[in-house]
Image (cartoon, helix red, strand yellow):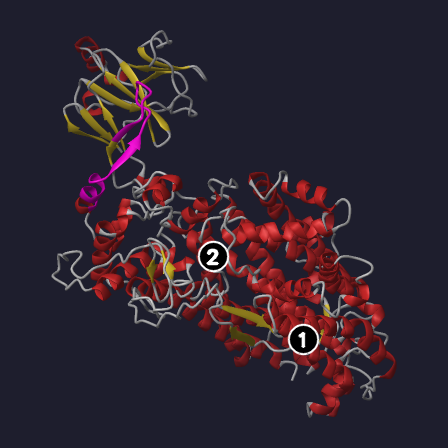
């Protein structure tokens, strides 16, 4: 937990204390602050970055990581057309059934289906990944201290280990991971994907794009929330101002 | 019926048979309220409104939530993603819990500062403490429902508190769980109780208001109202003042809901519960942190534990101390023997009041920190001071605390300070037609 | 002080200018507050409407290949039963020959089936929502050879039109589209 709000008794003002990122820090470094299109009061997701990020997820991350809470239809919210979404979905197979013979069968995924998971269950995922379990990524930016900054830092934080640090078999050194030893091998390499919009696929660019995509996956309501928030707060400010006027008028009798 | 004060014949007809309108007229309209209440007196009605918001959003969320370990987490995410305005309703409910506690804590400290718990309002105060206890239970039960990692481990840790009870402790924990760990039966009953308790809360709130209206609100100078001149009708004066306060609150509250909805939450609760992995640093929600610090202060080597180490285990001592930190409020009206209510006229008590506030903030910070030096020592000292304040300082101040001279009535300082005309004092007492 | 407070308590306002301005401010504030309350009420009501995932799942594709002439099958769409009938020539003719003037809810059979061979209707009685019998073999088909609702005795014909009984309307035809000769998408 990053911050705690304590309410003082006699003051409406509340004392906010940053208690640092104490979560099993080990020797992990605090991720640097990044500029994100979706931060701030009026932040919106950069559509280009979202679609590139989906490409990175789909071509790189999806081999091991699920985003099980997303449905293919959700991709229409980030600018894919219905036909594109149908195509993306149809490239995956889902298990359905039972059919009239009582058998489960495979069929191409449809827009209404949730994203197909790379492994059917945790045991299969561990068996396929040297005993490590690649976590689901849908809520990753909400589920980690530092959110998007952390995710971007982690993806770009693979370094040569210091001489005095011994890595366990199959582990990689990462500056930002708790304990610095991570089971995930460096996932991104220069030019690992070929962007349709000709953006240069540097590691930083891909990390940035996939982080944006995952931030959207975690909070698909973000743009709507902020837009609505501005309106609601403005409305409440006016209403409160009017109520203050009424209060003054009513109480003016007494003074 | 002909004499009814209501002109509308339908209202008069109903009121003659079921006096709801007379009741509302008495309790909401005419209800004589001290005219010198300041904005600290807004927080009671505000808490009531938040309770309504919580119940309404809660009922709505229950329409979509599934209390089963296999579906709970996903059903909450479905609310966030697919249900119309689900994210908004859930964020209101989630942040509403925090808002409820902020408002109630301010309400409680207002009572402490102005001596609102003193005769004849002891039962009013004690009902308030009952409300706090039910709120805490409800908040804890509700936090378990999203079935994230913090939900699960919070439930595990808090239910394990009862294992500190000698002899029957383990059986009680098994009973609470309905099994041998926090699992589906636990989640099911927690959902049921989380739905039930707010309505119990409403009942106690009604009693709280009945007790309040018996002798009326206390006020900043602590002198009870003596003549109608000291009071004004609740409506429109305090209804409009409360509404304005509500507006200010809503601006701040929706600021959190729309722009920092997870600020007060914990990232680990967006990871689905896993009974085989404990998060490295578990903390309760912020409103439980001071109590959590008191709980953790009692370790086998803690100085505050030594005097009672022959009597009970440190674990039991910690649990008892945590409950005692709230239960001590029940006997506060009898611990404080000072005849003067308001801290305005008790300069020494005022200093100690602020020390208590600081102490509670320190306890909260300690509760958030990992249990290691120096935080453990600070927490132990702050815990000791908390009880020292109520058990020793308050009774002593009742006998030795110097007080300032009191005004003779509420109107006196108002007339003096307000530059009011002398005619105001001689006008007829204000009365309802 | 007291006199003006009396006025406020009485509600017997004078027509002074100050009073008018105050009344206007109060009215405006009240209207504003009512708007906010209405908006809040709306979202608390709208949350009960079908959620996005429910709407997304509201089409059903049916393979017509295995259905033989004369056969009736039942599929589920939006949680409701849908009757699919592969009608024989005789049945189509009978349904088309009915005098529309004699029907409680006049509707030509040609308008109820995109392809005369395939009748696709929602199997929910328009009276009070029971499922009429007649789809499975051996079930009572009613006096008109279509469907019979056992709850309150409504008779439907081979086009799913109400002929007798308390139901006011014909069995409704859902939106559907033939994706190919043998594949239909309902919804």
Q: How many marks?
A: 2
Chain ID, mark 1? B
A96, above or below B235, in the image: above
**Residue C163 sits in which quadrant?**
top left
Res. B359 mark: 1
Residue drawn at 77 percent across, 49 percent down: B166
C182, above or below B98, in the image: above
Q: Position of residue B279 (x, y in %)?
A: 50, 56
Say which residue label 2 marks.
Answer: B268
Tell me if label 2 and label 1 are in contact, CB under 8 Å: no
Question: Farthest residue toward the top?
Answer: C138
Q: What stretch is highlighted in magenta?
A: A85-106
Q: Where is residue B192 in the image (x, y as percent from the top left)?
A: 60, 43
Task: Work out which quarter of the rendered image holds the C terminus of chain B and state it.
Answer: bottom right
Q: Where is residue C83 in the image (x, y as percent from the top left)?
A: 30, 21
Chain ID, mark 2? B
Check disc 2 and report its element: helix, strand or loop: helix
- Mark 2 surroundings within 10 Å by alpha-carbon count, few (fewer than 14), some (14 through 19), many (20 or more): many
Q: Along the horizontal axis of the image, is B250 left or right of B200?
A: left
């Amino acid at each position: 937990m990053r911050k705690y709000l304590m309410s003082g008794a006699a003051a409406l003002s509340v004392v906010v204390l940053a208690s640092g990122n104490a979560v099993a820090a080990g020797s992990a470094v605090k991720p640097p602050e990044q500029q994100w299109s979706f931060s701030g009061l009026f932040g919106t997701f950069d559509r280009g970055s979202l679609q590139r990020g989906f490409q990175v997820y789909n071509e790189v991350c999806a081999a091991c990581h699920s985003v099980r809470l997303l449905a293919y239809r959700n991709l229409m919210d980030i600018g894919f057309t219905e036909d594109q979404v149908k195509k993306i979905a149809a490239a995956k197979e889902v298990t359905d059934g039972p059919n009239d013979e009582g058998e489960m069968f495979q069929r191409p995924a449809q827009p209404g289906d949730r994203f197909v998971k790379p492994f059917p269950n945790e045991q299969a995922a561990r068996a396929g990944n040297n005993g490590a379990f690649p976590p689901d990524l849908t809520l990753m930016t909400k589920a980690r201290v530092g959110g998007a900054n952390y995710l971007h830092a982690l993806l770009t934080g693979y370094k040569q280990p210091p001489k005095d640090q011994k890595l366990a078999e199959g582990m990689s050194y990462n500056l930002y991971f708790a304990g610095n030893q991570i089971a995930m091998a460096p996932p991104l390499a220069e030019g690992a994907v070929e962007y349709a919009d000709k953006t240069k696929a540097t590691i930083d660019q891909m990390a940035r794009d996939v982080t944006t995509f995952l931030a959207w996956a975690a909070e698909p309501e973000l743009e709507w929330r902020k837009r609505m928030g501005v309106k609601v707060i403005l409305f409440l400010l006016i209403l409160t101002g009017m109520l203050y006027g009424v209060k003054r008028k009513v109480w003016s009798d007494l003074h | 019926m002909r004499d009814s004060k209501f002109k509308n014949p339908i209202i008069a007809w109903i009121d003659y048979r079921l006096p709801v309108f007379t009741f509302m007229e008495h309790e909401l309209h005419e209800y004589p309220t001290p005219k010198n209440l300041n904005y600290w007196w807004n927080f009671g009605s505000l808490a009531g409104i938040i309770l309504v918001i919580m119940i309404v959003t809660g009922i709505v969320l229950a329409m979509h939530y599934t209390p089963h370990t296999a579906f709970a987490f996903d059903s909450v995410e479905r609310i966030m993603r697919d249900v119309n305005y689900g994210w908004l309703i859930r964020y209101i409910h989630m942040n509403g819990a925090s808002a409820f506690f902020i408002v109630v804590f301010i309400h409680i400290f207002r009572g402490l500062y102005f001596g609102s718990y003193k005769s004849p309002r002891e039962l009013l105060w004690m009902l308030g403490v009952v409300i706090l206890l039910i709120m805490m239970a409800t908040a804890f039960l509700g936090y378990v429902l999203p079935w994230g990692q913090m939900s699960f481990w919070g439930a595990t840790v808090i239910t394990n508190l009862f294992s500190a009870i000698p002899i029957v402790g383990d059986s009680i924990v098994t009973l609470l769980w309905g099994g041998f760990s926090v699992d589906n039966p636990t989640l099911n009953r927690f959902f049921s109780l989380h739905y039930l308790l707010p309505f119990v809360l409403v009942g106690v709130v009604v009693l709280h208001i009945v007790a309040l209206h018996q002798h009326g609100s206390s006020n900043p100078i602590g002198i009870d109202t003596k003549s109608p001149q000291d009071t004004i009708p609740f409506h429109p004066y305090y209804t409009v003042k409360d509404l304005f306060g509500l507006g200010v609150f809503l601006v701040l509250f929706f600021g959190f809901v729309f722009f920092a909805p997870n600020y007060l939450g914990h990232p680990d609760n967006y990871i689905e519960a896993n009974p085989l992995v404990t998060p490295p640093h578990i903390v309760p929600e912020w409103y439980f942190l001071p109590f959590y610090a008191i709980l953790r202060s009692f370790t086998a080597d803690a100085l505050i534990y030594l005097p009672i180490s022959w009597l009970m285990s440190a674990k039991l001592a910690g649990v008892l101390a945590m409950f005692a930190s709230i239960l001590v409020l029940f006997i506060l009206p009898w611990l404080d023997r000072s005849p003067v209510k308001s801290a305005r006229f008790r300069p020494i008590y005022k200093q100690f009041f602020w020390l208590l506030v600081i102490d509670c903030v320190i306890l909260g910070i300690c509760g958030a920190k990992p249990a290691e030096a120096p935080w453990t020592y600070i927490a132990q000292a702050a815990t000791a001071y908390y009880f020292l304040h109520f058990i020793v300082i308050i009774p002593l101040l009742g006998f030795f605390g110097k007080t300032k001279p009191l005004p003779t009535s509420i109107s006196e300082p108002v007339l003096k300070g307000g530059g009011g005309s002398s005619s105001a004092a001689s006008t007829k007492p204000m009365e309802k037609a | 002080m007291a006199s003006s407070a009396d006025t406020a308590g009485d509600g017997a306002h004078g027509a002074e200018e100050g009073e008018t301005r105050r009344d206007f401010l109060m009215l405006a504030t009240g209207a504003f507050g009512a708007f906010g309350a209405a908006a809040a009420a709306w979202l608390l009501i709208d949350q009960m409407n079908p959620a996005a995932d429910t709407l997304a799942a509201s089409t059903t594709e049916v393979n017509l290949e295995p259905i033989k002439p004369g056969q009736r099958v039942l599929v589920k769409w939006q949680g409701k039963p849908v009757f699919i009938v592969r009608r024989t020539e005789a049945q189509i003719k009978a349904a088309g020959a009915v005098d529309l003037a004699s029907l409680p809810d006049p509707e030509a059979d040609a308008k109820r089936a995109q392809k005369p061979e395939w009748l696709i209707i929602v199997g929910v009685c328009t009276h009070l929502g029971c499922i009429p019998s007649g789809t499975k073999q051996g079930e009572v088909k009613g006096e008109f050879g279509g469907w019979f609702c056992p709850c309150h005795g409504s008779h439907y014909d081979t086009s799913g039109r109400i002929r007798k009984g308390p139901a006011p309307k014909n069995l409704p035809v859902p939106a559907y589209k033939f994706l190919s000769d043998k594949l239909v998408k309902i919804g």
